[in-house]
Image (spheres, rainbow, N blue to C red):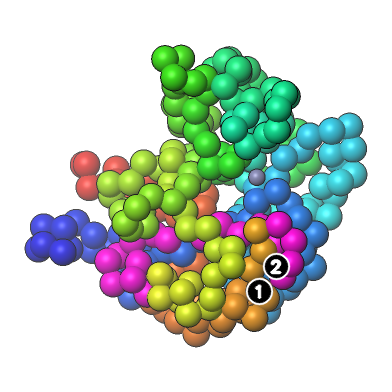
Amino acid sequence: MNIGESEALKGIWPEEAHQAAVSLTFDDGGATQLSRAIPEMEKRGLRGTFYLCPRGDDHAERLAPWKEIAARGHEIGNHSLSHTCSNNLKSYPPTRGLENMTIEEIEEDILEAEKRLRELFPETTERSFCYPCYQNHIGQGLTRQSYVPIVAKHFVAGRGSGEYGLPNHPLNCDLHYLVSQPGERMSGCELVGLTERAARKVRWIVFTFHSIDGGRLGINEFEFCDLLDHLAAHKDRLWTAPVVEVAKQLVKARAERQA
Ligand SMILES: [Zn+2]
């Protein structure tokens, strides 16, 4: 890190002693997030971001357990209404996929999800977005285009996929396509190591989880808790906060540096 960079990064996080920001994010609202991840996080005073899809006629009933989670300070994020991904992930013939959606349709889908989330969680009007299957495009080949600008129009931040190299640079990263580190099948040592590397480089590391133990894209509970123990033991250095809170901090910090 050169002198100019370390100067610009000084005071980037809320506390002087913070070396990195860490966000624990969870997709699709699986049952083990409620039964296993959240109790373990709360035991250690940690809050996360939970990306939900309010689809279906029963969405209000299905998502009701998340109301108290929101009330306890966790972020409820927007994961779109229909969770549409690319047709490449489907068998033939595919149903609707990103390849045959328009920008207008994707925006409508995201805004309908937002309307339902606001009805369900009226106390939280500011939230981040999470790209289903980490994909940020519609169309294919000559018609392919990014829908990141749509997300940027409506949200403070959008969580994307992993990127070769490093987690998010607080001043350089695209807040609307944040780099995230998939946590499935990882060991506690790997998760802690990645966090400490983020701290050494003054970065924001965003972890993506789905289920705890078994299940789709699962992580073993023991390994997950190893990361949580580390975050709790080093709270003074590692700022763990929901995506929306870190993004807002960076918007503020970037504006101050522009001034
Ligand atoms: Zn998802």
Residues marked 1 and 2 touching at CB (< 8 Å): yes
Disc 2: CA contacts within 10 A as few (<14), some (14-19) or many (>=20): many
Tell me the quarter of the image containing the N terminus. Answer: bottom left
Q: CA distance from mark 1 to mark 2?
A: 6 Å
User: How many discs appear?
Assistant: 2
Q: Which residues are magenta?
A: 196-216
| In the image, residue 212 lies in the stretch drawn in magenta | yes
- Name the mark on residue 220: 1
Amino acid at pointer 2: Ile
Tell me the quarter of the image containing the C terminus. Answer: top left
Q: Name the element at disc 1.
A: loop
| In the image, residue 121 lies in the stretch drawn in magenta | no
Which residue is nearer to you in this view: 130 or 165?
165
For image coordinates 48% across by 72% down, the residue present is 191
- Name the mark on residue 212: 2
Specify the quarter for ligand 1.
Answer: top right
For image coordinates 47% across by 53% down, the residue present is 180
Judge whether 160 appears above or below 9 on screen. Answer: above
For image coordinates 86% across by 46% down, the residue present is 62
Residue 164 is situated, as x and y percent measured from the top left of the image, at: 34, 52
Which residue is nearer to you in this view: 253 or 189?
189
Disc 1: CA contacts within 10 A as few (<14), some (14-19) or many (>=20): some
Residue 253 is situated, as x and y percent measured from the top left of the image, at: 31, 51
Q: Name the element at disc 2.
A: strand
